[in-house]
Image: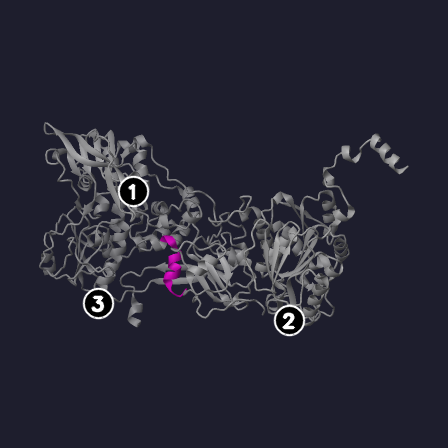
Amino acid sequence: MTYIRPKFRHPDLKTNDLGYTKTVYEGSLSTLCAGCGHDSISAAIVQSCFELAIQPHRLAKLSGIGCSSKTPAYFLSQSHGFNSVHGRMPSVATGSNLANKELIYFGVSGDGDTASIGMGQFVHVIRRNLNMVYIVMNNGCYGLTKGQDSATADEGSKSKSGSVNMFNAIDLPSLALELGAGFVAQSFSGDKAQLIPLIKAAIKHPGFAIINVISPCVTFNNNPGSTKSYDYVREHIELTSTVDFVPFQEEITTSYEAGAEQDITLHDGSHLQLHKLESEWNPEDRMSAITALQKTKINGEILTGLIFIEPESKDLHHVLNTVDIPLNQLTAKELCPGSVALEELNAELR
Amino acid sequence: MKFFFLFKLFVLKPTDIKDPEYYHKVVDCQYACPAHTPVPEYIRLIAAQKYTEAYMVNWESNVFPGILGRTCDRPCEPACRRGRVEDEPVAICRLKRVAADNKSNVSALMPKAPFPSNSKKIALIGGGPASLTVARDLAPLGYEIHLFDDQNRAGGMMRSQIPSFRLPEHVINEEVGFILDMGIHTQFKTRVESLKDVIAKDYDAVFVGTGAPKGRDLYELPGRQEGDANIHIGIEWLASVAFEHTSAIGKKVIVLGGGNTAMDCCRTSRRLGGAEVKVVVRSPFNEMRASPWEIEDAMHEDIPILDCHVPKSFVVENGKLKGMMFEKVIAKYDDKGGRALVNAGEADVFIEADDVLIAIGQSTSFTWIERDLGLEFNKSEMPVVDAVTYQSTLPKVFFGGDAAFGPKNVITAVAQGHQAAISIDLFCSGESLKNRPSPFVNLVSQKMGIHEWSYDSMVEIDNRQSVPLVDKKLALSDRKVEVELGFDHLHGFTEAQRCLNCDVQTAFSENKCIECDACVDICPTSCITFIPNEEDESALRLKLTMPANNHDQAILISDAVPGTKRVMVKDEDVCLHCGLCAERCPTSAWDMQKFFYSVTKAGNQCQIAVK
């Protein structure tokens, strides 16, 4: 009987700038299937928040319904959480963000929750450029209802029961690019070295940041013929670049050979250092990002890494020109300035 | 395949888990035990209240579970993994006592004499733990064993030097009795004065287990002769108390020395009328040789320990000992770790005493061995003994226990006794003594189903239980009242549950691994890393998620995993053996497998003949 995780940790665990060990960012023990890709993503989220020294109470994790949407229970147990209705996480996130823009909003969704029932909400949250991280744990099937093909299952992909998917897949990164997302990345649950810097950069991005993470369903979609299995994804991964996230306090010391290196300064002064492996791709150019995605798709490969970034993205609050103080902190005094102010306003309009 | 790894030509080879010593080393307690007692195995039996079975697992390896459960030097406990993940090790030694205290009648489980004879005769000189171990191993094989001891009962130093309040006589009698009941021919009150005479008789082999019976003295110290009536050698004095020749001591007592004998001397003195007993030791307190728990027990009985006091003289007035003068010193250390005690620049200290006990070490005594027998001695007057076979340069004479390599402890004597018995058996069968038997090992999966293992893998966070003690007043009033009461069933269970089951090994099969990272993510102590292989182990150790800086502990390196050709590296150092890696593994690439390791005893080495 080992579904209780021992309390002991490695005695030499490192602490972050807040003096916390990684333990502070952990959640309860996962109840997902053993070997689920989602658990690796949870671990990457824990590691990213630990490394960024985020105060756990300054982060809100939001999710919808599905295996993926269960995961917020498995990380950051000291943060805020909202497990919403199926596919409706974006509207809860929008409401929360409008009310209190000072929290970090961390949305977790799956391929069903995003690309099927939640598609309507998904496209609009991109359109509005809500300042949040949106992670799709994409396994190409409905794991919670025994593995039916989802809307992101590739055409021709074979399910565990042997049936072949007849429909085209919705490509979430392409869709996000099309709708104007300012941060688009794609990764693989089995590659934390890539996923962790991407999550860190996504948290720092001042607008909507989506990371589509291929996360194999070990129970229903890890069979030969599936295009979302561990083996298939490993065989067909194409990297845009290697990614290094450098917090703004740190001095950049690494240097790559000229031409291959690209340094992107993020909004808060942190850096993303990319060692480019795709020569014709420029992560700051939407057209080249779309081309790179399409090209790899035609070649039957899966492009992972940072795909597109617009460092100075203008989020919803900026567009709506809201006040600097979070709305939930406004009191009756500010909201109802009184008859004198009304008189002055009216006078201006005369 | 688009992962970019630089493949090196010469990379580390996967760990050879077929070598029984690899997994053996992971079981820290068992590895540290000189007799390699399967500790986790018997602790699980204690938790299951199978005390008799737990006792027999012990008995097979260490022969004296009841005695050792009270008096062992516990090399296992500092080695315990628990000490590396929290503060205190499992109370292994006192758990052993739980098995001994609560066992049912085990006589039916003991080898039953008479045994069919093999017409060989063995003489054992000295009746202590080493000789008794040889007797136990050889008697069931049909050897006729003749045991000589100058006391009237067997047990050696266990009987004469360990006070009854730590080790009651009935415990010695029972465990020594199990062996003597195997038809051992005992010749007590028989002091062997000549090895030549013994050899002249028709013994096929002779085993010398005479211990280290000579206590060191301070002949040179002024006043030693004049005060002789009240100056005693620690081990001799303890023996004379044990055999009831001595029943009182002065009110003020000085005990010289910082070892376990000194602790026994001072605590015995407290029981024989010593009201002001002081231990005076040359070295600084933290360098005393006594086990920490024995020092603690002495201090609990209101015995002060004065460190950094070097004896200068015995002060005798009118032929009567008055006390001792000491020089105060401080310890100075050089770069090489050498220590010098230098005068502290303080006035000499006088300490009053009616009696002084000298417990500053003991040594072997071989005046009874003639030097013309072909049995070589080295410069320090120790017999030349092979460290593996325990054979002397006179082929039919074997040594073991303190007599072989100087004073150590009971469990070492037992371990050496086992090895000497193997040698004697090989010698008497005309085989080469180099044909040491391989250990008996077994490795078997503990998986019973989903979330189900045949061992209790939950890691308890309870702290170490302390052993309840008898009321101090009562303890000090009678030297035969045992101070430690031992764990009751509940405390025994709680303590047993603290054991991490290090013998249940994390076995990894790379060919089943799909690299889903489930084990990496779940491991509470972050000891699993998938990483490109390296040429050099030190380099690899540094690159792990948590660098494996404890080089005393091995790292388990797998072969290349099929997917990314990386290797799995597991640092054995702080692995909790909780089994979560195996629990979360979707393909059973990880499995929890119980590793049983037992040192083969004499007569069971049939596999050698096959070779």
Q: Determine crowd level at label 1: few under 14, some 14-19, many 20+ residues with C-alpha closer than 10 A.
A: few
* Residue type marked 1: Glu
Q: Residue furthest front?
A: A258
Residue receiving disc 2: A225
Q: What stretch is highlighted in magenta?
A: B17-29
Residue under mark 3: which chain is it in?
B
Which disc is residue B65 wearing? none
Disc 1 to disc 2, C-alpha distance: 68 Å
Residue receiving disc 1: B287
| Residue A290 forms part of the magenta stretch | no
Residue at x-position 77% and y-position 34%: A334
Q: Position of residue B246 (x, y in %)?
A: 17, 36
Q: Nearer the viewer, residue B528 or B345?
A: B345
Residue receiving disc 3: B429
Q: Is mark 3 on a helix, strand or loop?
A: loop
Judge from the rendering whether residue A315 lies leftward or rightward of residue B395; answer left or right: right
Judge from the rendering whether residue A272 lies leftward or rightward of residue B335; answer left or right: right
* Residue type marked 2: Gly
Disc 3 to disc 2, C-alpha distance: 66 Å
User: Which quadrant, please, contains the C terminus of chain A?
Assistant: top right
Between tags 1 and 2, which lies in front? Answer: 1
